[in-house]
Image (spheres, helix red, strand yellow):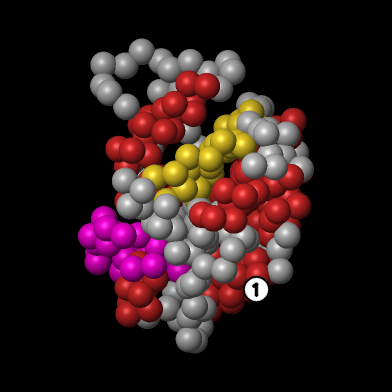
Amino acid sequence: MLPTLWSGPWVWRNQRDLLSRYVPRVVEIDGAVVNWPIDPTLDAAERYCLEKMADCPSPVLLVGASVGGLLALRIAAHRPELVSAVIASGCPGLGTGGGISPPSSFTLSFEEACEARSLVIRNTHLIDDELLRKTVDEVSNRPGIRRGVRLLRELRGYDVAALVRELAVSTTLIWGEEDRLSPLAPWRELVRECPVIRLEVIGAAGHIPMLDEPVKFNEILDGALQRLDGIQPRLSKDPP
């Protein structure tokens, strides 16, 4: 599971149990992307993911949110032999969403984080102040802020449409209909050109629908996993 630019894999907290029913091992790449020990480029971020995947039996199922979703798509396009399928949400690079403004300095204030929270999720109480403060503490450091700003600059000129058209790996995109950072409309248009991609939309959800609407998201995720060749759910007494 791949995290977002500014937050760790906790965004997938409601999906871990469901994923573990289908795969023998769920691996999380820890920490927000801005805190990875890499140069501030998408190429470096992709290489870091590949290093973390090295001990995983191939092919792997990649699950990613926002920038993590984009990295999953990049790996699937560039190294399809390593990837069985992709589940991604809120990938940046298309449209003209409002975007999160870079921090005003080389720190991130709690007030700036509150503003960002209101942009990424409709049900803001699902990222409570305690979790938000913890996240701010983790990413509010000079190297992390600099890395994040440079990655955001690269994303502005990145040709994600060309990347997506290269995909030959089964991909499910699960999008919040009210995503303000990665608007839905241009992705609808692009998916029409890509037979390997299935787009699912969740109404009343924003940029991180896995938190906004976890029950609906998991229904879609469960269906996507059931459609994958060679993946069967393990017996469990608990519902997904």
- Residue type (three-letter) at the residue carrying disc 1: Arg
Residue 62 coordinates in the image, percent (x, y):
57, 38
Q: Residue at x 74, y 30 (%)?
A: 81
Q: Horizontal and vertical percent for residue 166?
A: 76, 43
Residue drawn at x 48%, y 86% as measured from the top left: 104
Magenta region: which residues?
A: 118-139
**How would you rate the neighbour count of disc 1 (Cα within 10 Å): few for under 14, some for 14-19, many for 20 or more?**
few
Instruction: Give the residue drawn at x 56%, y 36%.
Output: 198
Up the image or down, 65 lies above or below 127; here it is above
Q: Tell which residue pokes out farthest to the top in this image.
A: 235
Q: Which residue is mark 1?
A: 153
> Can I make out residue 39 in this image?
no
Q: Is residue 167 above or below residue 44?
A: above
Whether residue 17 sits left or right of residue 198 in the image: it is left
Q: Secondary structure at mark 1?
A: helix
Picture quadrant of residue 113: bottom left
Is residue 82 found inside the magenta-colored segment of the image?
no
The answer to which of 193 and 80 lies nearer the viewer is 193
The residue lying toward the viewer, choosing from 91 and 149, is 91
